[in-house]
Image (cartoon, grey):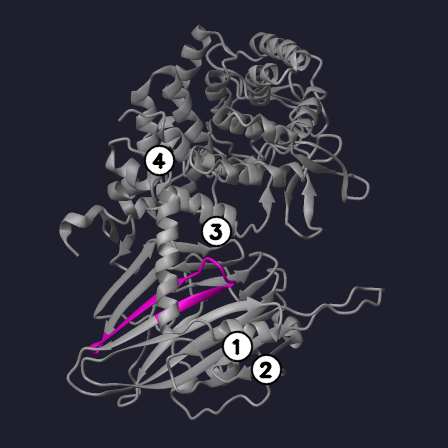
Amino acid sequence: MGQSNRVLSNAYGFFEKDSGAFVITDILTPRPWINVLSNGRYGVVLSQAGGGFSWADNCQLFRLTRWEQDLAQDAQGRFVYVQDMDDRTELWSTTYQPTRRKADYEEVRHELGATTFTRRFLDLETRQTVFVPEDNSAEVWIIEIENKSNRTRNLRLGAYLEWHLGGVGDWHREFHRLFMESRRCGKALVAWKHPGLAEHRRTEPEEPTRAFISWSGVDRVTWITDKQEWLGRSGSPANPKAFFEAVSESPTPRWDDPIAGGLAELVLAPGETKCIVITIGTAPTEREAIALSELYDETFAWSELLRTLDAWQARCRGVDVDSGDPAIDLMCNTWLPYQAIAGRLNAKCAYYQQGGAYGYRDQLQDSLMFLEWEPDSTLEQLGRHADAMYEDGGVRHWWHPNTDIFVQSHHSDTSLWLAYGVLEYMEATGNAAALQREYSFLNRETEQAGERGTLWEHCLRGIARALSRLSPRGLPLIGAGDWNDGLSHAGIDGIGESVWLAMFLFDILTRWQPVLRNIGLDAVAQRFSSAADALKVAVNEHAWDGEWYLGGTRDDGKPFGSHTCEEGKIFLNPQTWAVISGIAPPERVQIAMESVRKHLVCPYGALLLRPAYSKVDPYIGYITRYAPGLRENGGVYSHASTWAVKAFAMMGDQETALQIYRGMLPPLRAEADVELYAAEPYVMPGNVDGPDSPYAGRAGWTWYTGSAAWMVRVARLLNP
């Protein structure tokens, strides 16, 4: 590749200027640098070393392969081996794991929708490309092996994974393996887990979903289905027994420690390249699983790969940010939208966190990224959240779709996010007809869909719920936390107040008024106007601390986010939303944001609060359990830091807005100090350690963060 196509390099790799792909040239990155591949029905997390896991439908509830998060070892995954049959001591893998042999040449290319591993040993080059096609519940591995020598090569290939076939809670391996079974079907192995029975009831067991792994491009596959038979006694995936001792097909595929170990022979003439396709996937029945397993031969696999890559490029480049800043434009037109769509909306999963559920605030905000080029996708997501609202205007904090697994929200802000999202949609599209779409409300007693109402009625009930929960001073009660979940104990007695929530509610009430008048709801608009005026008075009378706005008050009546506090003196969100909402007088805006510059803006973003809490406080919440400087406890919480970008840009302070934005950009952080930054340079982290941490500037919790979509949205406010 020409040097002119390499941009934003660091010690471990570089970006391709034309495609946005990130190419890793040193495999031993400071942390696992992963890709998330998902079409919404099937997903893969795949690290640069080959670690990771696969799932279908839900990364928590039906994980196909066994995996344990381990940032240091990253040793579990789905692996392909190559062995030189003329010298059987020569065994390596197409990824760094599990053999961990240093290759003569090595490169990993993460791109939108696929990852390719290229390695070279003993004049043999392997290229393994992994992708999830758009239309099927499967992942496809295209493995090319090229003989660069002048002699014929006799090779043995192997593929290995451990079946999990259940939820992440199925940790008791010796128990759960008792329910698993597999069956050989030629060059495919089909596996399933026998279904559970409902306690104290007799019901017909459901047909279990079938998982499979299949090979194409080899004459025959020998299947080993027992882990000990593959690895050997006290064996290791680095040197499996199956490659060094005679093995035969497992005769008892239901009584084993269930794996899928496949072996095949391959002969390569001098200069010859052969292609093998391995498919892993799921289907409702064995017949459908076998049909899907036979679908991806070499020709079809290559065509589907190109179709998948083209689709991802087209969708992400629809953002069309043209700021003139190469780092901003590269991220906004490739990885940031990809992270929001593939990681947050489709997979709801990453390496640091495997969610699987919809969060009421979370995916709703992610979907707002679509407004300028794909607004129907935003509306579809808003509809999902409307259906997760109760008849009283409360909502589920998170829920796993198509299950009865959920948590009711006790946070004070969640009932407002639908109204906020629909408002953003209305302002972007003007589609007033969408307000008349009908959705269900949940009944709290039955937890089932009850009465139905329009989208507007859902928004109104959420707003009404928030307005019904005000303190005697007219400020919203904080409950078990506002946007900041870590303030989990500030208001559990029903006394503590949230200043940020007052500003958020004021913003919603104010901006809804012209929309309501346009559709003839003048009386409602007037009620909103009166309520907004009362909030404005309450905030400016009770929440101004002299140089900034308070974070709020606790159940014991004491303030947090005040100059009187020893720790947590100043919180970011009330200052930025004083600007965003317009609730503050101009002179206070200037003072508050100058305090943000002085106390919270740092070289890598805007801190959520400062100074960090150093001891657990039962009147604040679990935020105080974190070590100082980590995550919400005095770190840069990327989501909130994007609001600081927006606030400074709205004030006309482009210099500070751009400073914060560029300070957060992963390519620039890695370019400056990749060892300290540690995380992937191509996706947003959820947080960066603050100055109270000894690792200030270190990133964590990448991929699964709402900041990716917000980084795209606020980029349009910048003038580099």
Give the residue type at disc 1: Ile
Which residue corresponds to mark 3?
A: 352
Mark nearer the N terminus (3 vs 2): 2
Give the residue type at disc 4: Met
Which residue corresponds to mark 1?
A: 259
x and y percentages locating residue 628 in the rendered image:
47, 36
Mark nearer the N terminus (1 vs 4): 1
Magenta run includes residue 128:
yes
- In terms of secondary structure, where does tag 4 sit? helix
Front tag of 1 and 3: 1
Q: Is residue 8 above or below residue 119?
A: above
411 to the left or right of 106: right
In front: 125, or 664? 125
Quadrant housing residue 215: bottom left
Quadrant housing residue 159: bottom left
Visible residue check, residue 546: yes
x and y percentages locating residue 585 in the rendered image:
48, 7
Which residue corresponds to mark 4?
A: 664
x and y percentages locating residue 259 in the rendered image:
52, 77
Q: CA distance from mark 2 to mark 4?
A: 49 Å
For label 4, the crowd category at 10 Å Cα-Cα, with few meaning under 14, some 14 to 19 and many 20 or more, is many
Q: Which residues are magenta?
A: 121-142
Q: CA distance from mark 3 to mark 4?
A: 19 Å
Give the residue type at disc 2: Asp
Badge 1 vs badge 2, beta-carbon distance below 8 Å = yes
